[in-house]
Amino acid sequence: MVNNEANTQHVYPPSSSNQGLGAVYHHSFKSMKQILLPIILPAFVFAAQCCFIDKEPGFKDMPKIDAHVHIRTSKPEIMNFAQEENFRFITICNRSDNREFIDKQLVLAKLQQQQFPQTLAYLTAFSIEKFGEPGWEDDVLKLLQRDFEEGAIGVKVWKDIGMVFRDGSGNFIMPDDPRFDPVYQFIADKNGILMTHTGEPLNCWLPLDSMTVLSDQDYYKNNPQYHMFLHPGYPSHEQLIAARDHVLEKHPDLRMVGAHLGSLEWSVDELAKRLDRYPNFAVDMAARICHLQIQDRKKVKDFIVKYQDRLMYATDFGIRDDSNYEARVTDLKQRWHSDWDYFTTRKEMTSPSVRNSFSGLGLDNKILEKIFYKNALRWLPGVFQSTKETNNE
């Protein structure tokens, strides 16, 4: 048997009398490092950026809040599903014409909140039944006091104020009517949130075939009572937005969330003007993300980066006891995951609400955290109060 190790000749570089093998190796390694380091280091940095800095977060890894939904069911299945997806809900009571309907929504909201206190919070609403009659204001404030004491974190003003109700003289009752001021001040004094759904998308004032997104065409085709193009004597989009802005001007200490991108979904430039003008104003994205997808991608991304502390993710999802649970959950899951891809990736996408394809925004992880949950914790005082995120804010 041949001992290869014993027969191997080791040839070393020549060395001077005062330089040992260690010094020779050190000199050779130093020379090699000087040659290779400029090549290796940039490659390593590039790999690190690809693997870590730009890595897309996992959908279920990040806590998320859907900040505008309508959970009108006593069944727990939808709450269990939300927990599986690492989502929580802010459920909203709406409509101003019927206190009985508001109370029915509150019963279900409180039931779910009691069973799932860290998964669901809720906003109440007030009715304008008997509006203008003696005692209306006192009755509303008493009911709101009760609702806050029982767990409501804020109040919703729906679109029927401004688009449906008229006073005794036949004038539309607008959101900035002075008779609402004590209600708004009460909410501010309670450190609650006022959510306003004032007006509708600008498409609402256009004919169906001129609307910019398909989802608006479908909605107004099925809800002609809210299609303002068919009702020329009703307030204009500009009048409604001005009335909402007037509320912000009159109540600078009132924290307001404008539902549905503040009904300025058609232009991030117009929305930016309001965010600049009113520091007490933020918006949710409920049912309006498709309007971002049809605008210039760079402009939308720049807008989100600039106003990253003022935007909240939301869907406007709704479910009732008589809903087809499987169909509703399938729809919600598809929406959540599609929206997630839009905000987290740069891939080319399509949507049933949008005519053409569009590219995802590929937002930074820190911005995603704000949009998907941190902003809701900041703007909705008291929501999920005992959670770790709230305590760390």
Image (spheres, rainbow, N blue to C red):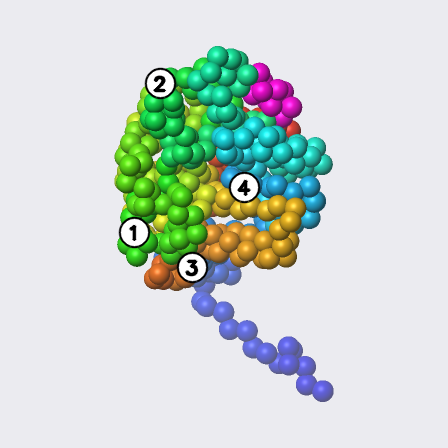
Q: Which mark is residue 163?
A: none
> In the image, is residue 133 above or below residue 51?
above
Look at 56% across and 21% down and name the residue there.
144
Three-letter residue code for mark 4: Val
**Front residue of this view, candidates 195 and 103:** 103
State yes or no: residue 251 in magenta.
Answer: no
Which residue corresponds to mark 2?
A: 250
The spot of residue 367 in percent (x, y) is 44, 42
Residue 164 placed where, x, y %?
40, 34
Q: CA distance from mark 4 to mark 1?
A: 28 Å
Tag 1: amino acid: Pro
Residue 167 in sight in this render: yes
**Residue drawn at the location 41% of the way across and 61% of the way down:** 350
Of the residues under marks 2 and 4, which one precedes in the sequence?
4
For marks 3 and 2, give the CA distance: 39 Å
Q: How far is disc 3 from disc 4 in space, using C-alphas?
A: 20 Å
Q: Nearer the viewer, mark 3 or mark 1?
A: 1
Q: Which residue does the numbered mark 4 point to in the structure image?
A: 69
The earlier-in-sequence mark between 2 and 1 is 1
